Amino acid sequence: MLFSKSHVFVKRTAISRVIRNYSSLRTYQKECIETSLKELKAGCYKQVVSLPVGSGKTVIMSNLIPCIPCPTPKATKVLLLAHRQELLNQAYNQIKRYNPNLIVEIDQGKRVADYDNADVIIASVPTLGRNNSKRIENLDPTLFKAILIDEAHHAVADSYLNILNYFNNPQLLVWGCSATVKRHDGLSLSDVFDKITFHIDFLDLIERGYLSPMKVTTVKTSVDLSHVRHSGADFALTQLSQAVNTSVRNEVIVSSWRKYAAETGRQSTLAFAVDIQHTQDLCNAFRQQGIKADFITSKTPDLTRHQILEDFKNRKIPVLINCAILTEGTDIPSIDCILMARPTRSATLFQQMFGRGLRLHQEKQDCLIIDFVDNFKRSGTAGLVTIPTLLGLSMDESLRDENILALEKRVEKEKETNEEQENEEDDDSLVKLRITEYDSLQELTTDLSTRVEIKDASKNSWVHIGDDKCVLHVLSKGYLILERSHEGIWKGYFKYEHNNFYAKPHTIPLQSDHLVDAIRAADTWVQKKFSSGYIFRQLARTAPFRKTPMSEAQRLAIEKHKLDAPQTLSKGQAMDLLTKLKFGQLGLWKKEYMAHVKAQKEEQRRQNAAELKRKGKGMAL
């Protein structure tokens, strides 16, 4: 037991006494704090919460700090980790605002904290977490009750792990928050966090009036990104810059801004570029057309950057271009237009960029996101993230000044329509197959529809093989497999596809005694592993390609299994059938058939014996 029975956890009534101005917190902020404490009481020490840009993550952290119980009498301090100066300063100001009686210190570079007397130490990760850092030795792990991590999606970096490994205390709360963590149940996120304990997304907060209304306009460009090399989860920056930093594309951006932003009264536009050269060239494209614009990059001196940001906040500069500077920790509520000039395959980065415009401001009605959509047609790879793909639409969807909430409702309605059509088509899922291998197994009828319990659990095209196995085919990647053990526990693994041979299966971290929970956890894993709108569109049962006719290659593949399938099979049905065959369904069918034949023979023998018995009785008479 980690805490003694005498240890009292803070309840809602007690929280209101601990937190100054508790009633002034937003409802979801209170819920986040209360849920985090409840999960801690239940024994969850590695938590992450998912909160969009503008939701007040620092406010929540500031008010959570005094409520965190001390696991031991001397463990009273809190360490807050951030990786940039803006985040450090922002956290300091908010914590002091809500906790004026706490001693709060910043530990960064030449700014050395008072380690002995500080209640809260806000530390720079580059300072504290670098390899062989002597600075961290000033911290006694036994004196800390919690480590809080701002922008927690960075927490798997080596510098963060160095700090966490140094503390290595099972009674220490490790609590992170991020705008780009996605909520899914049943699966650990990483070695750092065990559970997402609270989630609210930007659409919810827009609907509740806590974030600015958002409008979207897409602008198609002629740039082709299909041949741009990948680096990790995104494009390689050098090649990406070469592809998009052209005079033609930059002029499209400027003219689009004139048409959709300037002419409609937008006063404060933030643009995201690829790299320093692209930032400068795009800024010059605005200036050449007489538009007052400026830029900041990592090479901009601190004093110059501060002055430019102040002028931008005060609307003295209508257009500001940056690269990788204002994606995190930037609080400029007056922004009423975002130019998405930096293509990305990362949903995390994409949401960070447009999220900069979602803070409320008394002088703006909404924020316009102008999304520049380049061509990207490389099959089987993580796709280009755009507003349409983020909502589940085609990348080619053309949007003009559309309200994001209205767009979301349209998407949901289309999904409902697709599901209704799918349900109507379930009657056609009974497919007659002729087995050519054995004369005695001439024909069988199989149901290629999705079981109801699987359909309710997931929108993806899972297929079942018997009662103890389910498989999801991830196109061009491999197969996600769930199997039930003899003990009744569902476990998962992934078989990667490599040029007609399969590597050793990769075990995924899930165990469940319920199939529905296992499928949800597996969907979480595949979304985290292959973060691509393209891939997810192919996984869905309602993916348009699944309704097209079966290909010749699929027909030949089915024939290799000694099966004749009707030509009316759709591509989706053929894919599901091939997945079933690959993982042993034909053997199960044959076993079922032979059991049926055996039962028929037994019944025939019984009837024959009864017939002889009756005849014998007749002869005796």
Image (cartoon, rainbow, N blue to C red):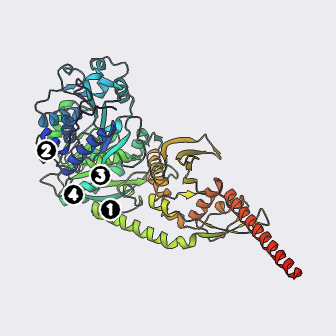
163 or 347: nearer the viewer: 163
Q: Secondary structure at mark 1?
A: helix
352 with respect to 484 (left or right): left
For discs 4 and 2, the disc positioned in front in the rendered view: 2
Percent of width and height locating residue 262? 20, 56
Residue at image point 61% right, 68% down: 569
Q: Secondary structure at mark 4?
A: helix
Q: Earlier in the sequence, mark 4 or mark 2?
A: 2
Please report contact status of discs 3 and 1: CB closer than 8 Å, yes or no: no
The residue that disc 3 covers is: 201
Residue at image point 13% right, 44% down: 22
Residue 512 seen anywhere in this rendered image of the structure: yes
Q: Earlier in the sequence, mark 3 or mark 1?
A: 3
The residues bearing labels 2 and 3 have C-alpha atoms spaced at a distance of 23 Å
**How packed is label 2: few (under 14 Cα within 10 Å), some, or many (20 or more)?**
some
Q: Amino acid at mark 3?
A: Asp
The residue that disc 4 covers is: 208
Relative vertical location of residue 452 with respect to residue 320 in this rendering, above or below = below
Q: Secondary structure at mark 2?
A: helix
